[in-house]
Amino acid sequence: MKTALYTRNGSADAVLELVDKPQPTPQMGEVLVKLATSGVNPSDVKSRTGRPLAGDFVVPHSDGAGVVEAVGEGVDSSRIGERVWIWNGQWQRHYGTAAEYIALPDFQATKLGEEITFETAACFGIPGLTAAHGVNLLEQTTSDTVLITGAASSVGHYLTQMATLMGRKVIGTASAAKHSIVMEAGAIACIDYQTQDVGEEVLKITSGEGIGAVIDMDFASTSRLVSSPALQPSASIFCYGSNDMGEIPVAFRDLLFKQLHLQFFLVYELDSVQRVAAIDRLNWFMRSGHANTRIAHVLLLNEIVQAHELVESGKANGNVVISL
């Protein structure tokens, strides 16, 4: 089968290569999926550039969609021919979705409705489930208004739509060039984080009331809000990422006396209850009739270097998908 892989960390053009690999055979409890699409995410870029390899090589990408072609022992044969989308395809494994086939545990291939395209479904695993879990956490709060950082990103775009559909008012952050993406997704306002003080703008937008919840993609920046009056007492910050993965100073006194709640989550490590709830939320969103998946580029497997470079540059105004 045609496969993209890398055998060492480095730049996309230096380490990604196309090779032929034997088609995998599904083992006990597994399904074999003939992939139609593979989603490319920022985490795939970060893995390629710096995460230690889980063996001699890595076939990248955790997200994808296709059709079940065979099943291993213990899996109902009625699944053969089923349209599915994949989550955690490459998480702690050699083989991801940048290949014509993938064999993986039965429960990691989720049934896909006929009305949803494979291109859209290739965006569900990381962007879709991160957003779905984020709004599940948001639902635990009573905050009428939520700040969503990086609201024009793949995750942020889903978050903005889902939170708006829940009846929350969304203030997003994005570069000026991407403001229209955020507003079209349903936000009441968008702050240019590159030129404006986010805390000051939040106070202006809320007439001085501030906000009670944040869903955050970059704690290195958002940590500064802890000391801002833009965060109400007992506000919650739900964080799934940071541009600085080292030590980030936080004002403990403000955390303590404002009784702020910090909760971090990693979509790869959701427990079974959280995973089911996130999939249910994503299904609810897709059935709503209001779901919009921004797909900026659909490329071929032999264009995987370009796909990674687009994601790495941050210039793609939407998801990057590989058609197989």
Image: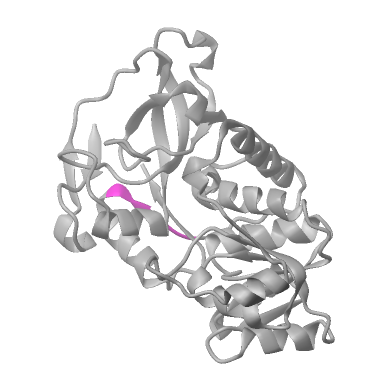
Q: Is residue 186 visible?
A: no
Please state if 237 lies on the left or on the right of 317 as rendered: right
Decide: is 49 above or below 81.
Answer: below
Nearer-the-camera pick, 233 or 118:
233
Residue at x 27% of width, y 23% of height = 24
Work out which quarter of the rendered image holds the N terminus and state it: top left
Numbered range of the magenta stretch: 296-301
Q: Is 318 situated above or below 122?
A: below
Q: Position of residue 126 (x, y in %)?
A: 50, 49
The image shows residue 80 at horizontal and vertical percentages of 48, 16
Residue closer to the observer: 55 or 4: 55
Number of numbered discs: 0
Visible in this render: residue 61?
A: yes
216 and 42: which one is in front? 216
Quadrant (top left/top right/bottom left/bottom right) for the C terminus? top left
Q: Main secondary structure of the magenta part?
A: strand
Q: Nearer the viewer, residue 241 or 36?
A: 241
Q: Check if residue 84 falls in the magenta segment.
A: no
Q: Residue furthest bottom?
A: 195
Residue 253 pos. (x, y %): 63, 76
- Relative placement, left or right, of 9 versus 295 is left
| Residue at (19, 38) in percent of width and height | 55
Q: Residue 294: where, in percent of width, then height? A: 57, 60
Colouring of the image:
one colour
Occupied quadrant, residue 115? top right
Q: Residue at x 47, y 27 (%)?
A: 67
